[in-house]
Amino acid sequence: METILVVDDEKNYLVVLDALLTAEGYEVITVDNAKDALKHITDSDVDLVITDMKMPGMDGMELLKESKRINPDIPVIMMTAYGTIEMAVEAMKNRAYDYITKPFQNEELKLTIKKALENHRLIKENRYLSQALSQRYRFGNIIGKSEAMMRVFEMIDKVSRTRSTVLITGPSGTGKELIAKAIHYNSHRKNKPFISVNCGALVETLLESELFGHEKGAFTGAVSMKKGRFELADGGTLFLDEVGEMPSSTQVKLLRVLQEMEFERVGGTKTIKVDVRVISASNKNLKEEVEKGKFREDLYYRLNVININVPSLKERMEDLRPLVHYFLEKYGKEAGKENITLTPEAWKLLYSYPWPGNVRELENVIERAVVLNTTGSITPDDLPPELLGKEESLDIVRFIPLDADLQKTLEMIEEKLIRRALAHSNNVQAQAARLLGITKSLMQHKIKKYNIHI
């Protein structure tokens, strides 16, 4: 629902315009002076301003200039009963959208408003699109060549073509928001907003306001109307990060929105309808949270129409080398060290570390190493202390069930070791064989056995 701010010191015009525009389906805010108008332009989500030219104190021309300073994109329609060509020219020079005289024709005004809002929507859509292109959220730019990531890419490709609700699961630091953006920017909604909110970062009262917006005076500190994330994402995608942290009372309201695609702002009574695709993410097992009574079962099934599980970094160590090269290039350019490399000893430490913080931790480690390095070749001295511990400090036996099939377990471990060695050696079979202490012919046999594509 688009919001129009009407500014006029003549109360009868405020009443007439309020009734006319409300009947057209707009949300209307009316004020009788420019000072109050500027507060709304600053604090509220206003899509269009209609202002009288002649007003006591700050006049319409000054309001036009100030509104453009606050928000250059906001369209402003000027009204006056004392129209002259000079005033119209000045208004257009100051980037007014249009200039109309009183008394106005209702149909003419409605048409002007419609065109102004369409132009405003186009500007916003172009901005979202340009941001998307600059950030390059295409799943081809999510780094990974492992089988696990190939499955993720396949899911992104299929899901992007649908309207279905998606739940992305996986440990923290695996890039769940990047997956959500890839889905959005490869869908038919790509020219519309991608809006995200971290459900675990806000207290219950603030989360509800962030999601659904609030009316002026809805609670202490609500000094103006504010649109929520659902409203801002209309036509596009809303990403609910860490949805498992959402309080139960908010879960109930979210369920209704997913079912009906309508809601009321906090403190409001007007029902707002939206068209939003919801993608959520969680590092928790939501099914277990349902069993514990911490997450609503009906909401879980609403969110989990399609599930994409993002593997941890230790489950796709074949991707470590391309990830490292990507981060070296990224932070090398930023630091003016574009040809920076790693020594074999540094690579060995990266492959030996279990990466509990996943890709995010790896990125931080590489950024730190690039910043600290002065020689152009990253050594173990450039890496954080936690990477310098014993290479095999993990007792893997305690992670294997007591009744595990011995042959299958050994083969699983063997396959992972071979894949890791190949990734470390950039798929040079002889080098990978030397790392594992086996012959090249045996390495080739194992590659064929486990159907490893090089």
Image: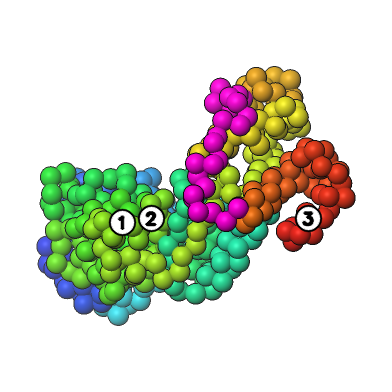
Query: Does the magenta run of residues contain 309?
Result: no
Query: Which residue is found at the position 57% from the left and 56% from the top?
Result: 405
Q: Classify 400 as above or below 183.
A: above
Q: Kindly identify which numbered label has been placed on residue 439.
A: none
Q: Is residue 65 visible?
A: no
Q: Kindly identify which numbered label has been placed on residue 289.
A: 1
Q: Which one is in front, 393 or 262?
A: 393
Q: Which one is in front, 452 or 335?
A: 452
Q: What stretch of residues is rendered in magenta?
A: 383-406
Q: Which residue is mark 3?
A: 447
Query: Does the magenta run of residues contain 385?
Result: yes
In this rendering, the label closer to the viewer, 1 or 3: 3
Which amino acid type is shown beneath numbered disc 3? Ile
Inter-mark Cα distance, 2 to 1: 6 Å
The way the protein has been coloured in the rendering is rainbow
| Residue at disc 3, secondary structure | helix
Residue count near mark 1 (Cα–Cα under 10 Å), binned few <14, some 14–19, many ≥20: some
Q: Is residue 1 left or right of residue 345?
A: left
Secondary structure character of the magenta stretch overall: loop
| Residue at disc 2, secondary structure | loop
Question: Which quadrant of the figure has residue 203?
Answer: top left
Q: Classify 327 as above or below 207.
A: above
Q: Which residue is mark 2?
A: 285
Residue count near mark 2 (Cα–Cα under 10 Å), binned few <14, some 14–19, many ≥20: few
Q: Are marks 2 and 1 in contact (CB under 8 Å)?
A: yes
Which label's residue is closer to the chain start, 1 or 3? Answer: 1
Q: Which one is in front, 161 or 387?
A: 387
Q: Is residue 287 left or right of residue 382?
A: left
Inter-mark Cα distance, 1 to 3: 40 Å
